[in-house]
């Protein structure tokens, strides 16, 4: 019986889904990969780590190295763990030392995501970084701000999830802006 | 908390009730052996399976033979999954060369998936080959859900029949659950997930050239990102529908390839509870009194909705560690704010809290945010939902048969109050049924409390903690609550991939599965033999508000009496410490 069910649910079923996925949604079923000039530069779905002032930065990642696509995970630090307060304080200090406005820092920029691969930041977190990115690239801040506003995705269907900005897509567009 | 957040929650709940009813009634036809719309396509497949499996006896059996088949099927499944993990390094479809899984981890995972717990002591993408994911874990995702649904069908027959010696045929119920219910739903859900970007391929990891190479503090430079791929969509679809919850990836459905968008999140949230809701309608149809099923469902919603509201409220405010100077933690038009540690931006607070409550109410155990980083009260609710015995929706089939055991205790309590022999659905509840129901309710409680006590006393148990203080105790309590009720979610800071936890939690999962399912089958057998007693003026109607409240009170009372002291040492003391600063 186990053998019969294995043939059905362990072989036939995944192969049916595979065949449907590869024919109907080829690009998505293979990881929504982004290829630029023949080079694989990432997946639209998977966050990458950005440190240089010329890029928009994504969410902090608790994986090692940051945004490890082969071993995902969160920090799992509890709310009363002193270590959590310490890392958040360090992230605040780091963000304040870069050329950012004196306004408050959106909370998603100082907290590690659940997967360590979060591809998005909140619209507030993207706006927060506009001046720094524009200065580092010698671009007009107004142009960079407009780029951000164009790429704010509203909640899906108007009410599901949250508004967000895909950091990799934004950075690829930024690179094309010159 | 925002209006849009509440709207999402209301939409999911409405969809569940609207679609749960037709699905549940369809399932009742499947278990009664009646003709269904799918017969023309799936009938030949069903007969083919019986032929391949060499199943000649398709007649009904008594509860003992039914239970023997249930145990035998689990035993063979566990053994096969163990051997597959131990041998995966030698087999095909291991494009990333992950090699063989350790003996204790294989032991734990084999039990975990066969018992519908899907506790994950390992990191999926770094441990299990694509072959093991499909032939091993995927198959048990179907099999463990289908066998839980089979037991429920047997128990429903026990209530529906009078003076009958048989309660059904396990193999037939198993195959029909898989073929007519789980498989069609999984294909539909997998397709829906594919539209959102969940992958389904057999490639090795994608090698990405990073735009901005990472230079670590010690000077090591990382210029590539490896992205693990595989047959994910098929696996995720059944893990949600079958209340399994074992993720393809380590971070489960927080991973952007398992759950890429808020729309995929909606599909998955719906899938987690749909069978738990539908089986209530199935039960009502099978006992030929639909009001009975609706009453059980109402009790589940009555327990679930307040729990969900508390989690949502608790996570909407950030703990002091995040609410530092210069940090904006409040919701506004540019961000959702709140406790974002361990959560994803695309889901925010509402969709994360909804998932956390659903996955622990159902014995699903998948996560889309890291429960270990929840606020003390936000983490207490999922823990309590598991400790109530996984009867608020609960596992596929297993949730409702657990709830029916509580219903038996509830009518017994009502009987005690007025001095009458208790009845439920026209069957007199006797000493044997009460003994079995009590056993099934008390075993998970004992497993959770004893397991936690042993773990915090032994150095091998304490050395796995990530967080200090009360939160560390919560990690252990959560682990045993999860394993001891076949849930599978975790406060994942606890390093459970050690020989101690692999063995201890493995044994807890076995006890929670068999010492609940077997008493339920024994009750089914005993009830099927009984005569029907006509309802009199002294009979407590079990479809009205009085019974619904009594049932909820029974569930809460057993849970509170058992777990309050333990909870006081964990999340409650942590909340007090936090409030104190």
Image (spheres, coloured by chain):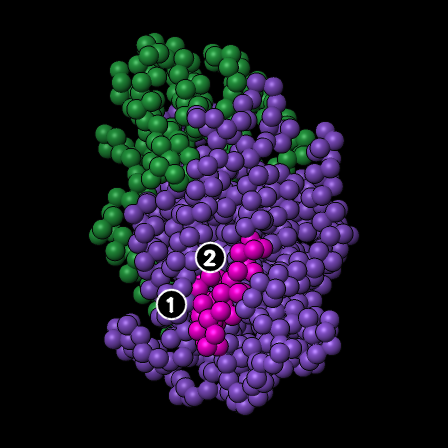
Chain colours: A green, B purple
Please name the residue that numbered disc 1 is placed on: B181
Numbered disc 2: secondary structure: helix
Could you tell me residue B60's position as x and y percent?
46, 87
Q: Residues within 10 Å of mark 2 (few under 14, many from 20)?
A: many
Above or below, comparing residue B387 to residue A122 in the picture: below
In the image, taking residue A111 as reference, residue A159 lies left or right, namely left
Q: Main secondary structure of the magenta part?
A: helix
Which residue shows up at 54% across the image and 68% down it?
A: B543
Quadrant of the image for the C terminus of chain B? top right
Residue B309, percent from left and from top: 56, 44
Q: Which mark is residue B270?
A: none
Q: Which residues are magenta?
A: B275-304
Mark 1 surroundings: few (<14), some (14-19) or many (≥20) residues within 10 A:
many
The residue tagged 2 is B273
* Residue B262 location (% of width, % of height): 39, 42
User: Which secondary structure lies at badge 1?
Assistant: helix
């Amino acid at each position: 019986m186990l053998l019969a069910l294995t043939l059905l649910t362990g072989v036939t079923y995944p192969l049916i889904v595979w065949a449907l996925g590869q024919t109907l949604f080829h690009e998505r079923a293979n990881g929504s990969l982004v290829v630029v000039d023949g080079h694989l530069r990432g997946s639209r779905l998977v966050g990458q780590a950005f440190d240089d002032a010329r890029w928009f930065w994504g969410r902090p990642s608790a994986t090692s190295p940051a945004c490890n696509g082969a071993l995902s995970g969160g920090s799992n630090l509890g709310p009363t763990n002193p270590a959590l307060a310490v890392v958040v304080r360090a992230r605040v200090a780091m963000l304040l030392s870069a050329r950012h406005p004196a306004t408050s820092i959106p909370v998603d920029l100082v907290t590690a995501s659940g997967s360590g691969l979060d591809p998005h930041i909140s619209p507030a977190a993207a706006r927060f970084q506009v001046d720094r990115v524009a200065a580092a690239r010698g671009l007009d801040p107004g142009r960079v701000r407009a780029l951000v506003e164009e790429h704010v995705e509203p909640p899906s269907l108007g009410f599901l999830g949250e508004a967000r900005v895909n950091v990799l897509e934004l950075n690829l567009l930024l690179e094309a802006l010159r | 908390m925002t209006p849009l957040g509440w709207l999402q929650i209301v939409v999911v709940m409405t969809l569940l009730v609207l679609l749960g009813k037709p699905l549940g009634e369809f399932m009742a036809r499947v278990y009664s052996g009646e003709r269904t719309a799918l017969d023309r396509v799936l009938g030949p497949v069903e007969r083919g399976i019986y032929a391949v499996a060499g199943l000649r006896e398709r007649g009904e059996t008594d509860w003992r033979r039914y239970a023997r088949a249930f145990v035998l099927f689990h035993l063979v499944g566990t053994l096969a999954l163990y051997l597959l993990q131990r041998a995966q390094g030698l087999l095909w479809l291991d494009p990333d060369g992950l090699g063989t899984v350790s003996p204790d981890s294989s032991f734990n995972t084999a039990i975990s998936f066969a018992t519908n717990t899907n506790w994950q002591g390992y990191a999926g993408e770094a441990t299990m080959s694509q072959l093991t994911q499909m032939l091993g874990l995927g198959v048990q995702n179907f099999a463990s859900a289908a066998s839980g649904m089979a037991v429920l069908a047997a128990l429903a027959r026990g209530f529906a029949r009078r003076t009958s010696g048989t309660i059904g045929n396990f193999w037939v119920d198993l195959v029909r659950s898989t073929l007519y219910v789980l498989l069609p739903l999984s294909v539909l859900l997998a397709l829906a997930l594919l539209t959102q970007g969940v992958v389904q391929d057999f490639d090795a990891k994608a090698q990405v050239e990073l735009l901005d190479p990472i230079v670590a503090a010690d000077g090591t430079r990382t210029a590539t990102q490896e992205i693990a791929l595989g047959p994910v969509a098929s696996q995720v679809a059944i893990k949600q529908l079958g209340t399994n919850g074992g993720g393809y990836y380590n971070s489960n459905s927080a991973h952007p390839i398992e759950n890429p968008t808020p729309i995929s999140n909606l599909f998955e949230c719906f899938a987690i509870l749909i069978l738990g809701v539908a089986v209530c309608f199935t039960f009502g149809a099978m006992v030929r009194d639909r009001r009975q099923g609706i009453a059980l469902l109402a009790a589940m919603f009555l327990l679930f909705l307040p729990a969900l509201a508390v989690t949502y409220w608790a996570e909407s405010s950030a703990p002091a560690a995040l609410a530092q100077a210069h940090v904006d933690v409040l919701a506004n038009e540019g961000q959702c704010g709140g406790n974002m540690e361990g959560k994803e931006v695309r889901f925010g607070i509402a969709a994360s809290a909804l998932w956390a409550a659903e996955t622990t109410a159902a014995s699903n155990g998948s996560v889309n945010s890291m429960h270990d980083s929840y606020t003390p009260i936000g983490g207490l609710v999922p823990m309590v939902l598991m400790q109530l015995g996984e009867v608020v929706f609960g596992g596929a089939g297993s949730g409702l048969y657990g709830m029916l055991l509580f219903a038996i205790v509830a009518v017994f309590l009502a009987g005690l109050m007025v001095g009458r022999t208790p009845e439920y659905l026209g069957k007199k509840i006797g000493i044997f049924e009460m003994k079995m129901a009590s056993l099934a309710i008390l075993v998970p409680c004992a497993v959770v409390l004893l397991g936690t006590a042993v773990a915090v006393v032994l150095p091998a148990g304490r050395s796995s903690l990530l967080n200090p203080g009360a939160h560390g105790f919560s990690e252990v309590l959560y682990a045993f609550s999860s394993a001891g009720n076949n849930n599978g979610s975790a406060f994942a800071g606890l390093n459970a991939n050690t020989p101690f936890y692999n063995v201890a939690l493995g044994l807890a999962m076995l006890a929670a599965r068999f010492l609940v399912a077997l008493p339920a089958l024994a009750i089914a057998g005993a009830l099927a033999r009984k005569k029907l007693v006509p309802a009199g003026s002294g009979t407590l109607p079990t479809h009205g508000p009085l019974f619904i409240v009594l049932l909820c009170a029974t569930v809460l009372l057993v849970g509170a009496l058992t777990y309050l002291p333990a909870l006081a040492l964990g999340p409650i003391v942590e909340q007090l410490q936090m409030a104190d600063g």
